[in-house]
Amino acid sequence: MTEPKILVTGATGKVGGALVAQLHAAGVPVRALVRREADFPAGVETVRGDLGDPATLDAALDGIDAVFLVWPFMSAEGAPDLIDMIGERTRRLVYLSSAGVADATDEPGEAITTFHAELERLIEVSGLEWTALRPTGFASNTLGWADEVRTTGVVRAPLANLARPLIHEADMAAVALKALTTDTLLAARPLITGPEPVTQERQVALIAEAIGRPVRFEEITQDEAMEEMKAAGYPPELVDAVVPAQARLLADPEPVNDEVERITGTPARTFRRWAADHAADFR
């Protein structure tokens, strides 16, 4: 059996899962890091391990040339040991960061961009070949509306007119594949976006179109949204970071570019396409 060359962390998530599928389809040996049993196409090796416990990663890193890293925690605690271990065992690291890193500060409510910025710094000085992908908002985050869409046909959320160039996970994976298998993105921090800004109200309309039944957007206040998210069990530090950051985008919107097409040769997928690809998740 050919030894896998690329390790994908976050392999059961949307971006990691798409990357595993694309690497496998391209004939690139791939190993998926999982914390529990998971189904992947025949030929994809799975190894159990936990990024929070580097001691569990020996088998996962054995024979690996490059690692795709999705950091699943809200701080950089533990990251130095992990990056040191990766640096001892492999040569290249591609990190899924955030477009917000360019504006990261130490202000309260910046928890997400702060830990991404710290991870980027640690990776840059590690001695590894590296790339830090900086995507705008994930289209897959709208899956948080799925229960409401299925049960009530009403999405209650703040900021109806907030327009974002949400990016399809398949496009993030396609850029990651280039970074992992070619030298074109070495020491780069590409900002990657969806093809156009789409308001939250319009996102709901496109989901409704994809599933073939009406869904209505009902705007609520930011305070109401934050209270509901915390009551639903979201970590308070995540809620306190996400909602105010989204509100700031009304006055300072995310940029839109064609980096996905420049890097991969294929235009970025629209939110309409994403909604059609995920219609089953909302039905």
Image: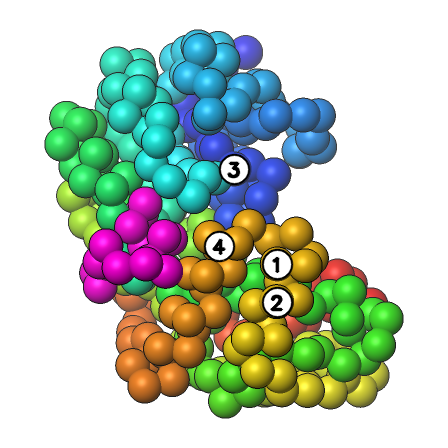
Amino acid beneath label 3: Gly
The image shows residue 97, relative to residue 70, as above or below, that is below
Q: Which residue is drawn at 45% across and 83% down?
A: 163
Label 3 crowding class (10 Å Cα cut-off): few <14, some 14-19, many 20+? many
Q: Residue at x 78, y 65 (%)?
A: 147
Which span is picked out in magenta? 102-116
**Spatial separation of the CA atoms under disc 1 and disc 3:** 24 Å
**Secondary structure state at the residue bearing disc 3:** loop
Task: Report the quarter where the C terminus lies.
Answer: bottom right
**Spatial separation of the CA atoms under disc 4 and disc 1:** 9 Å
Q: Residue at x 76, y 81 (%)?
A: 154
Dot placed on the residue nearer the N-terminal end, 1 or 3: 3
Query: Which mark is in front, 4 or 1?
Result: 1
x and y, in percent, of residue 62 in the image: 41, 11
* Residue receiving disc 1: 230
Label 4 crowding class (10 Å Cα cut-off): few <14, some 14-19, many 20+? some
Amino acid beneath label 4: Leu
* Residue receiving disc 2: 227
**Secondary structure state at the residue bearing disc 4:** helix
* Residue receiving disc 4: 238
Amino acid beneath label 1: Lys
Dot placed on the residue nearer the N-terminal end, 2 or 4: 2
**Secondary structure state at the residue bearing disc 2:** helix
**Secondary structure state at the residue bearing disc 1:** helix
Mark number, residue 10: 3
Label 1 crowding class (10 Å Cα cut-off): few <14, some 14-19, many 20+? some
Residue toward you, 132 or 74: 74
Residue toward you, 152 or 8: 152
